[in-house]
């Protein structure tokens, strides 16, 4: 457990905000031209998938913010 404050948490939050902003801008600019002719239900599915994909690396990122390591500590 962390006993002293570190810069990892505020830097991690800023990194997360920047990363999500870049990810969102990329999805909004690159995906629509590729799927604009698809039926609305398929477009919805694509956006739902892209809306969930960013969660995949989040666990390891939050572990790093808390512990400084990329994997969970052994107990």
Image (cartoon, rainbow, N blue to C red):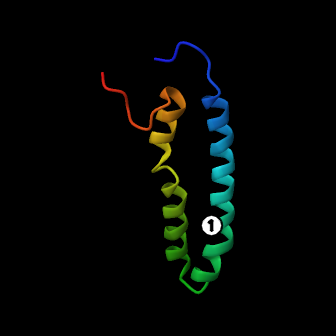
Report which residue position mark 1 lands on: 27
Q: Quadrant of the C terminus?
A: top left
How many numbered tags mark residues here? 1
Residue at image coords 49%, 57%: 53
**Mark 1 residue element:** helix
Q: Position of residue 16 (x, y in %)?
A: 62, 44
- Which residue is nearer to you in this view: 15 or 33? 15
> Within the image, what quadrant is residue 51 found in?
bottom right
Above or below residue 19? Residue 13 is: above
Above or below residue 6? Residue 41 is: below
Q: Is residue 8 left or right of residue 75?
A: right
- Which residue is nearer to you in this view: 23 or 32? 23
Above or below residue 8? Residue 51 is: below
Q: Position of residue 32 (x, y in %)?
A: 64, 77
Residue situated furthest left in the rendering: 75
Residue situated furthest bottom in the rendering: 37
Residue at image coords 62%, 23%: 6
Above or below residue 69? Residue 55 is: below
Q: Position of residue 21 (x, y in %)?
A: 69, 54
- Which residue is nearer to you in this view: 66 or 49? 66
Residue at image coords 50%, 30%: 68
Residue at image coords 59%, 87%: 37
Q: Is residue 73 left or right of residue 40?
A: left
Q: Position of residue 61 (x, y in %)?
A: 51, 40
Quick one: label 1, few (<14), some, or many (20+) residues within 10 Å? some
């Amino acid at each position: 457990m962390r006993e002293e404050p570190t810069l990892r948490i505020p830097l991690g939050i800023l990194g997360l905000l920047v990363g999500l902003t870049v990810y969102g801008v990329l999805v909004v600019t690159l995906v629509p031209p590729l799927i604009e002719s698809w039926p609305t239900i398929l477009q919805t599915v694509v956006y739902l998938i892209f809306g969930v994909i960013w969660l995949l690396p989040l666990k390891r990122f939050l572990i790093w913010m808390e512990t400084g390591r990329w994997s969970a500590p052994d107990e």
